[in-house]
Amino acid sequence: MATRTNNLYGRITVSNRAIKSVANLAISECYGVAKGRVTYIEVDENKIETIYIRMNLKFGVTPLTVAESVRSTVKYHVEKFTGMTVRIINIILVGIE
């Protein structure tokens, strides 16, 4: 599936695979994340409805702080890349390493 939007230059189509790649790179930049990946993306007309992330944290970090960091970092990078709004980012904490 792909996300489509229009601007004054024409129509832009971004594949979900490209969005996942950008989000996964953003996750890897965040302090405290041992492993993380995007599992699913829900797309609506001209916006990214929900991004689902599963991640393991490093031992000794505060889960809420890391989750907020991941949420804001992924939102920023995906919105900058696609030019579309991200409504919700759901994070599932799988474990601690």
Image: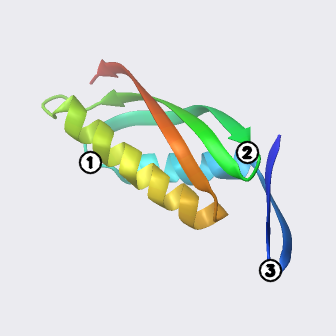
Q: Nearer the viewer, residue 75 or 39?
A: 75
State whether residue 85 is above or below residue 52. Answer: below
Q: Which of the two marks, 3 or 2, is nearer to us in this view? A: 3
Q: Earlier in the sequence, mark 2 or mark 1?
A: 2
- C-alpha distance separating marks 3 and 2: 23 Å
Do residues under tags 1 and 3 come within 8 Å of each other at their CB atoms?
A: no
Pointer 1 residue = 31
Q: CA distance from mark 1 to mark 3?
A: 38 Å
Residue at coordinates 56% horizontally, 56% vertically from top-left?
78
Indicate which disc residue 8 carries: 3
Q: Is residue 89 left or right of residue 65?
A: right
Q: How far across and how far down the image is residue 2, in percent?
A: 81, 47
Q: Quadrant of the C terminus?
A: top left
Circle 1 SS class:
loop
The kind of residue tagged 2 is Asn
Residue depicted at 50% across the width and 52% down the height: 25
- Front label number (2 vs 1): 2
Residue picked out by circle 2: 16
